[in-house]
Amino acid sequence: MLSLEIEYLTGVCFAAQSQSSDQPDWPPQPDRVFSALVAAWGSRGESPVEKTALEWLEQQSSPEIYASDAESRRVGISFVPPNDSSGKPEVMPERRRRQARMFPAAIPHRPLVRFTWSADPATENFVALQALALDTSYLGHSASVVRCRFVLAPQLEPKFASRVADRRVYPGRLSMLQEFHNRGERPPRGEVVMPEAIRKENGIPRSVLSADWILFEDAGGDCPDVRGIAVVARRLRDALLSRYRDEGIAIPEIVSGHLPDGAPSNRPHMGIVPLIDAGWQYSAGRLMGLAVFLPRETDKERIDAERDWLAGLEDDSGSIALWRNFERLLSSISHLKLGKLGVWKINRTLTPAAWSMHAARFAACAKRWRTVTPIALDRHAKAKNAADREQEVAEIIADSCINIGLPSPRRIAIDKHSAVKGAPSAYPSGNAPTWTGWTLSGSLASRVLTHAVIEFGQPVHGPVIVGAGRYVGLGVCMSDPR
């Protein structure tokens, strides 16, 4: 058996469960450890012998983790300047913007972790892995100073509890890390390997929409008002579809939302949501970017396709080509033409500059959800009496929740105004200028808009995006922490 021993020399593990999480990642997961070994390999000159050892390690089954419990250090939001990569005047101290960051940490009861694989490496692989471990000085955050070493057939201390890994590496992970490093982008986390029963968290309902969003941030030009999101979303969709047509590539149903004959698809498909400055004390409702989401059922297929492509496997099913084309064509979009409103520049990012742009704000597990953009009702309410009409609207929204795989809510409160600070109202006041209304077109033009607070009988996993406009940025909900 092969075991990797990691000792935290300062007694503190600085690492977050995800980029937007305020919870520490304890014990560290195998994908984090593997990335640290790959970083050491890169700094040592990318030896072919050490690469072979890493490729052997990534093909092994998930290791058992032996670690003590830990205390979580409470953290707040710090505003720190981002890295200087432009050389522009904006990087001067008095002009630099501040980016919201959190630095969660775990203080383990015993600062020692062991990863044990049920495999015996060849001598040359063990020697190469040992060299990488001895050159690994930190794990995750650079403040997590560690001492690492590999050992064979270790005698485990009985005080250590055995834990199953939540994430794992896989064949092709090394190639993926190299690919993202060469592109200057942050790589995705390792593959989730929890049993299905645990992954569903004891049966907690999940929407059919994926929380793995593709983010675009405002990069200058004529940024539109959020009330025009339905039109802006269609511009992004049209720009993507035109790229498929220009290259003569068949447009997948999962992207277009239509069957090959042009008929509307009845399956979940690609959608676009606005990322808004909302929910904070001084939020002004400014549009800060866009996010593209896909059905949750495609998550594993996309990850497998990326992994298989980087591993050089044959594309027997066509899945690799489908998702590689999608990623390539979507990433090529750098601006949107908005007619008289001008041209809005957007830039795909893996590290959003503001906390308002993190998908985690919309993918939490909560009972209560509040609309950030109003819901476009799936049908018209027919009741004449105000009380009966409100009840009918609540029933329409409840049906919309069921349509995305969630249970019927226990309570729904509707209102003209959003319960999220900074989010625009569903419709303007009588004397307000016309531009304060939401711009809708096509089948949405006649839809009734309303904000709502939706409360379920049990926590549900987001994203919660409901109503007739859910694929073009309407009906986007944010969890209520209360």
Image: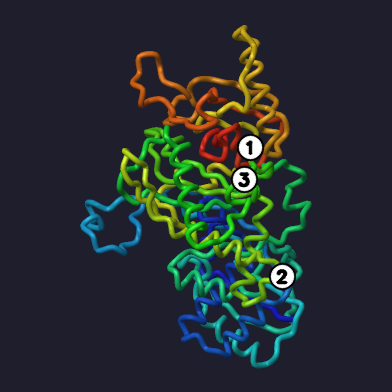
Label 1 with label 2: CB-CB less than 8 Å: no
**Residue 373, x across and y down, in percent:** 50, 32
- Give the residue displayed 42% in from the left and 32% down from the top: 227
Quadrant of the drawing holding the C terminus: top right
Q: Residue tagged by mark 1?
A: 366
| Three-letter code, disc 2 | Ser
- Give the residue displayed 77% in from the left and 54% down from the top: 196
Task: Relative to 102, say whether 393 is above or below.
Answer: above
Quadrant of the drawing holding the N terminus: bottom right
Q: Residue tagged by mark 3?
A: 262
User: Along the line of sight, which residue is nearer the eye, 426 or 64?
Assistant: 426
Q: Cα distance, mark 3 to mark 1?
A: 38 Å
**Residue 2, x across and y down, in percent:** 71, 81
Q: Nearer the viewer, mark 3 or mark 2?
A: 3
Mark on residue 62? 2
Furthest residue toward front:
261
Q: Cα distance, mark 3 to mark 2?
A: 45 Å
- Give the residue displayed 50% in from the left and 85% down from the top: 46
Mark on residue 408? none
